Amino acid sequence: MNERILTLRPDPGKTGVNILRRRYDMVRSAILEALADREPITFTQLATAIDALIGDTFDGSVAWYVTTVKLDLEARSLIEHISRTRPQQLRLTGMGREALKT
């Protein structure tokens, strides 16, 4: 089970990275769940929540994967960062809420 996914980037011209699908799916689900439970949330709070959810069972750098998958979910319009917030705050989009139902 070494299927891979090429992640997307919200920045035009930037290339994503190839990661294992199982890791992507685990982090994606955790991000969407964390945002559904408490939004808006800062990136630091999100990374801490994801580490608490999957850190014991995840075989990689949780912080790196959270960053990579967060960017991918922004590019896919499932989550968005709220403009002019410092520190950066994140929330689900309507499409992100729909993705939680599937």
Image (cartoon, rainbow, N blue to C red):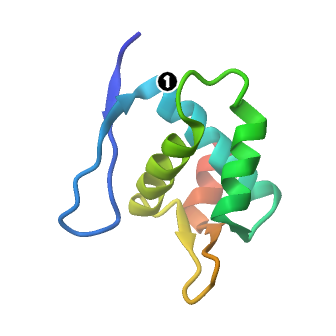
Q: Quick check: 12 left or right of 93?
A: left
Image vertical order of residue 44 relative to residue 22, above or below: below
**Residue at left offset 64%, top offset 48%:** 31
Query: Furthest residue to the bottom?
Result: 84
Q: Quick check: 85 left or right of 51?
A: left
In the image, 3 versus 99, the foreground residue is 3
Query: Furthest residue to the top?
Result: 1
Q: Which residue is mark 1?
A: 22
Image vertical order of residue 61 relative to residue 46, above or below: above
**Residue 12 in picture, x, y percent from top left:** 23, 69
Image vertical order of residue 23 relative to residue 90, above or below: above
Q: Quadrant of residue 11?
A: bottom left
User: Neighbour class for label 1 at 10 Å: few (<14), some, many (≥20)?
Assistant: some
**Residue 16 in picture, x, y percent from top left:** 28, 49
**Residue 17 in picture, x, y percent from top left:** 29, 42
**Residue at left offset 63%, top offset 63%:** 43
- Count of numbered circles on the image: 1
* Picture quarter with the C terminus: top right
**Residue 29 in picture, x, y percent from top left:** 63, 40
Q: Quadrant of residue 62?
A: top right
* Picture quarter with the N terminus: top left
Q: Amino acid at mark 1?
A: Arg
**Residue at left offset 59%, top offset 31%:** 26
